[in-house]
Image (cartoon, rainbow, N blue to C red):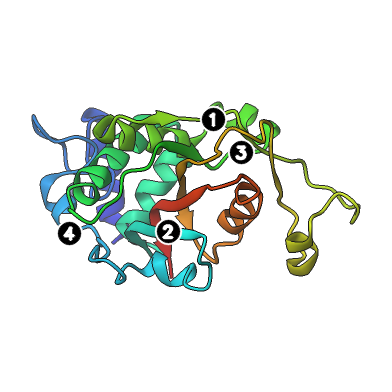
Amino acid sequence: MRMTRIWSDFVSLFFPNSCIVCKTPLITGEDFLCLSCLNRLSYTRSEKGTNPAAKIFAGRPEVKSAHAFLHFKKGNATQKLIFSLKYYNNKRLGFTLGRMAALAISRSPEYELPDVLIPVPLHKTRLKKRGYNQSEWIAKGFNSVINRSIDTVSLAREKKTNTQTRKNLYERMTGMETSFSLTNPNAFEGKHVLLIDDVITSGATLNACIEELRLCSKIEISVFTLSIAQ
Ligand SMILES: [Zn+2]
């Protein structure tokens, strides 16, 4: 096992364009992943109501639809992709996967296209440190298929605060430290918005976004995440 890893690291020195998952050098037409790994990704089911993300929001009638594209498990290929996207400056991978997901999902006749895509914002300090918001790159890829608009300014992630006074009811109930605020309360009035994130686990972050977004009148909210952790 260790020899395999040493060999694959050695190979990737000379073939920088190697598969993120298995390190095989890529051939023309392959992007980030070899065809074999691409075919073996843990894709979720996409028929209406069967997607695992839908179950997380089952008790929230304000969520119109929720979809996760890949299963995220410790050590699986999805984990490698997410790590590359978040910690190795691989923005273009986010675009490619977002585009792949949109091609798969939006072709379904029952899929209702959103008006605006909202990548879940990062804290300002986190954004500065990473240099990019990975969810924004997923949104860009998704939008390259559906051609709507992306809003990265109207929803902001607030700094963690210890005071109870600035938290809304939902945060006080859940003890959550993350909160979001609308910089423009009218931004999404009457719009169908698609919240986009890289991984969904408990849904706490997305629920905090939804709590703020639902203050907009006549808003419809859908959710898309690149992966779902189990
Ligand atoms: Zn591969």
Specify the quadrant of the image occupied by residue 203.
Answer: bottom right
Q: CA distance from mark 2 to mark 1?
A: 21 Å
Q: Which residue is mark 3?
A: 122
Q: Looking at the image, is mark 4 or mark 2 nearer the viewer?
A: 2
Q: Residue at left 53%, top 67%?
A: 60
CB under 8 Å between discs 2 and 1: no
Decide which of tag 1 and tag 4 comes sooner along the chain.
Answer: 4
- Of labels 2 and 1, the one closer to you: 2
Q: What residue is disc 1 on? A: 152
Q: Disc 3 or disc 1, which is closer to the eye?
A: 1
Mark carried by residue 64: 2
Residue 200, compared with residue 117, is above or below; it is: below
Q: Callout 3, which amino acid? A: Leu
Query: Element under label 2?
Result: strand
Report, in whole angstroms, how far the alpha carbon at label 4 lies from the one at label 2.
30 Å
Write the residue at 29% across / 42% down. Answer: 97
Residue name at image x 61 percent, y 44 percent: 216
